[in-house]
Image: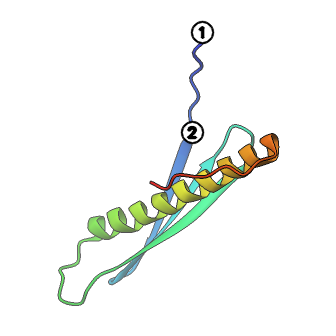
């Protein structure tokens, strides 16, 4: 059995103001396609300003959306190749 190592690079970019953080996630796949997703976090007015926490929340939401899009893409490719409907298991 031959083992192949493949790597993906995921990029996260943030835009922030005093109360909102927006994250944009991008993964470039070996076939040249790209999958993009977004996440958002809002600071409650009584919470202290902690930009890192906003980035973690918005980033996690963007990565979660990215994961769901990758699952959908993979199942679409399975369906196209096999001629049947696959059933994704949501994580």
34 or 75: nearer the viewer: 75
- Residue at the location (52% across, 54% down)? 67
Image side of residue 13 versus residue 42, left or right: right
Q: Secondary structure at mark 1?
A: loop
Q: Is residue 82 above or below residue 3?
A: below
Of the residues under marks 1 and 2, which one precedes in the sequence? 1
Q: Give coordinates of residue 80: x percent, y percent.
A: 80, 47
Q: Residue furthest bottom?
A: 45
Q: Residues within 10 Å of mark 2 (few under 14, many from 20)?
A: few
Front of the two marks 1 and 2:
1
Q: Is residue 55 above or below residue 29?
A: below
- What residue would you read off at disc 2? 8
8 or 1: nearer the viewer: 1
Q: Secondary structure at mark 2?
A: loop
18 or 45: nearer the viewer: 45
Q: Is residue 13 above or below residue 16?
A: above
Identify the mark at residue 1; answer none if there is no mark: 1
Q: Which quarter of the rendered picture does the N terminus lie within?
A: top right
Image side of residue 8 versus residue 83, left or right: left
Q: Residue furthest front?
A: 84
Q: Give coordinates of residue 37: x percent, y percent.
A: 57, 64
Identify the mark at residue 60; answer none if there is no mark: none
Q: Give coordinates of residue 90: x percent, y percent.
A: 49, 56
Image side of residue 35 versus residue 65, left or right: right
- Residue at the location (29% across, 64% down)? 52
Image side of residue 53 versus residue 15, left or right: left
């Amino acid at each position: 059995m031959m083992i192949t190592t493949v790597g993906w690079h995921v990029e996260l970019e943030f835009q922030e103001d005093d109360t909102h953080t927006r994250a944009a996630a991008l993964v470039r796949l070996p076939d040249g396609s790209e999958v993009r997703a977004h996440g958002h976090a809002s600071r409650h007015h009584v919470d202290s300003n902690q930009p890192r926490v906003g980035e973690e929340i918005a980033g996690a939401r963007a990565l979660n959306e990215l994961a769901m899009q990758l699952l959908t893409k993979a199942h679409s490719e399975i369906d196209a190749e096999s001629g049947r409907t696959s059933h994704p298991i949501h994580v």
